[in-house]
Image (spheres, grey):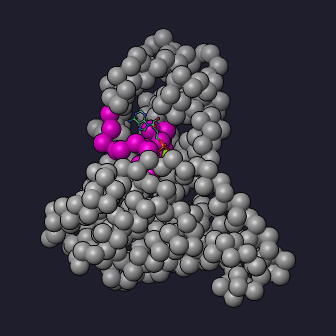
Amino acid sequence: MRTFFAPGRVNIIGDHIDYNGGMVMPAAISLGITATLTPRTDRRIYLTSDMDGAHPIVLDLDLPIHFDPARNWGNYPAGVIKLLLDANIPIEGADIHYTSTLPQGSGLSSSASIEVLTGFALMTVAGYQVNRIALALLCQKAENEFVGVQCGIMDQFAVAMGKKDQAILLNCSNLEYEYLPFHIGSYKLIILDTRKERKLAASAYNTRKKECEAALRQLKLQHPNLKNLCQASFQDIEEAIDHPILAARARHAVWENQYVYEAKDALEDGDLESLGECLDASHFSLSNDYEVSCDELDIIVDAARTVPDCIGARMTGAGFGGCAIALVHNSIIEQFKEYVATIYTDRTGLSPQFYVCDIADGVHEIV
Ligand code: ADP
Ligand code: MG
């Protein structure tokens, strides 16, 4: 039996700009999914998860694998397995059991975690040298084409390529990346899970993408060389876009991309106050100009920001529920949780979850 681990991820800053030519700054986290893999000799894969007590999901490696709604969560690993077979990677039968410390559907990328974990484990056991970026791309393709979720590359990239105590500065359009030491001294990165289901996220994501395309079309009438929204200036936007909502969407792209670079500089200078200001400003833009926050995220972020030793907070990920992050001094974490939970529950009736988050390595075998 062999054991593998894949982390979840947070996006520290840079949301909803990956499809506008902007930069993102994700990091892998210490919460994640563990898989134990026991080889089988009958060319079958049996998948079980401790989040689902039902019968194992069985795949026959010599039969075609199609999406099957009845397979439920098993479609995430099944999609990866299908693409590994399509790529002629010589995987063999196995019992794979998943256990998890990562909340599902909260925007911490449990889907990318289970995908990358499955691919990495099966390839490693087959004696195959894993190219982590190729694996991330394969898993994104599985989620896009097999499961049918139009995610970008950030999640799978962070899960596959994460490094302990390093954030990743990633250009999603060409996969250029660099590691940024995430040294935050006596502060901690806290994940605040609103426990609000991300129901509208998928449809809103598509609407925002269309709005951005429309904004870019208007800009291009006056600036034909402009490649994407993040390259525009505020003046271009004011002059070229007549619709206030489209102008606001474009402004978000420009601001957010700027905040990513400011956050990079702040991290490199060890200027945590400025890093916190970037997080705050990013939340403001996502909530007001881009309108992908929700009451629950705004309430939890506002509550966090009233704590003096919290120096920045923002929603993270696609929005409409899910998680926020905050930078909080390590001497007040318990009081912080209690205070934020009281206000949040009082105003929403929901019980939040908090995770003190360490930035961790990407997918690996546990030996
Ligand atoms: P997120 O990636 O933000 O957590 P998604 O909706 O993209 O949210 O993916 C969540 C889905 O991933 C779950 O509904 C489930 O199908 C699958 N999943 C995540 N973790 C596990 C696990 N430990 N075992 C089985 N399936 C899992
Ligand atoms: Mg996901």
Q: Residue at x 48, y 11 (%)?
A: 42
Specify the segment rendered in magenta.
99-115
From where the camera sits, is residue 126 visible? yes
Q: Is residue 3 above or below residue 255?
A: above
Q: Residue at x 45, y 78 (%)?
A: 281
Question: For residue 2, what is the image quadrant?
Answer: top left
Q: Is residue 168 above or below residue 257?
A: above
Q: Residue at x 65, y 30 (%)?
A: 86
Q: Residue at x 80, y 74 (%)?
A: 218
Q: Residue furthest bottom?
A: 235
- Side of 230 relative to 283 (left or right): right
- Side of 354 relative to 96 (left or right): left
Quadrant that contains the C terminus? top left
Residue 141: x, y in percent?
62, 42
How many numbered dots are placed on residues in this image?
0
Residue 296: x, y in percent?
40, 59
Quadrant that contains the N terminus? top left
Residue 291: x, y in percent?
55, 66
Q: Is residue 184 above or below residue 213?
A: below
Residue 152: x, y in percent?
59, 53
* 104 drawn magenta: yes
* 204 drawn magenta: no
In this view of the protein, which residue sits in the foreground, 155 or 222? 222
In this view of the protein, which residue sits in the foreground, 43 or 129? 43
